Image: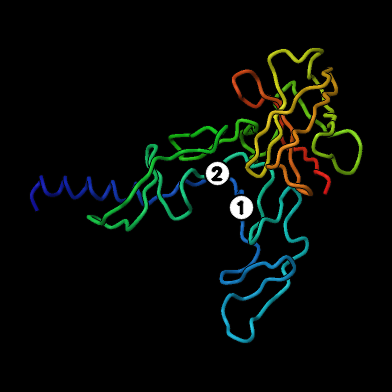
Amino acid sequence: MNRTRTGAFSASLGLLLLLSSAPAGAEECKKKICRDDYHFDGKVCRSRSGLNWKSHYTPDSPVCPAGWDVEGDYCVKKVCCERPVCKPDDRYRDGTCWSGPSGIGAYRSHYEAKCPAGWELDRVKGFCKNPACRIVAAGPIVAQPWSPFQITGYEGQGCVRKGGQLTILGNGFGDAQGPNRVEIGGHGVALRAPVVSWSSHRIVVTVPNDARLEAGQWYYAGLKNDRGNWISNINKNFTLCR
């Protein structure tokens, strides 16, 4: 084999290895409750195969750990700080997600690597980063408040009605609202909440009477600046009344 063919082969092999490697190190934000070929019906894991009789088993209790929610067949983390930008079976390379066979000469379709609204793309690692989180060096990835805007919870117990008032408790909000705003989010919803009153330790907002907010579902409230960036933690949840 001459030097030209050897160089071409080495370049192709290098590209193959690069495309075959998936980003590693992101936290797990979503995990299946049951074994493969089983689905979760809300109580037990049932086999997807079988005609007249399907096997089943009871998953561990609790089904999902603290800080996670059950969504269909999966446990989904309430506050996720990093997650791969590409689909599970695809490969990331310099802002692009590649799918299809990885062999030399094989056809591979691709698409632009894009993060959800409000998330930031790490083009080197191929991760989407949640700006509401701060990554702690030499330790686990955890959601922490941006200082000094810290939300510690909500006033009262039970649920909140759409069109009603929600009182946000915390520290360092400041004596005036300024250019900041309050946004209610979760489950694909992002709604601005009108501010009724604002003080250093409590903010009162009106929950929008919006059809996209589902009764009985949990949501979070957080603070954003005038550039649309999160400036508080968003790991405290409240529930809408049924």
Left or right: where 231 falls relative to 24: right
Q: Residue at x 32, y 58 (%)?
A: 101
Spatial CA span between label 2 and label 1: 9 Å
- In the picture of the structure, the residue carrying the numbered disc 1 is 30
Left or right: where 91 falls relative to 216: left
- In the picture of the structure, the residue carrying the numbered disc 2 is 83
Q: Residue furthest left?
A: 2
Q: Position of residue 138 (x, y in %)?
A: 62, 36
Judging from the image, what secondary structure is the residue with disc 1 in? Answer: strand
Task: Name above or below for residue 104 compared with residue 165.
Answer: below
Answer whether labels 2 and 1 touch (C-beta < 8 Å). Answer: yes
Q: Position of residue 97 (x, y in %)?
A: 39, 45
Q: Position of residue 226 (x, y in %)?
A: 63, 18
Q: How many marks?
A: 2
Q: Three-letter amino acid code at disc 2?
A: Arg
Task: Name above or below for residue 161 compared with residue 102.
Answer: above
Q: Position of residue 103 (x, y in %)?
A: 28, 58
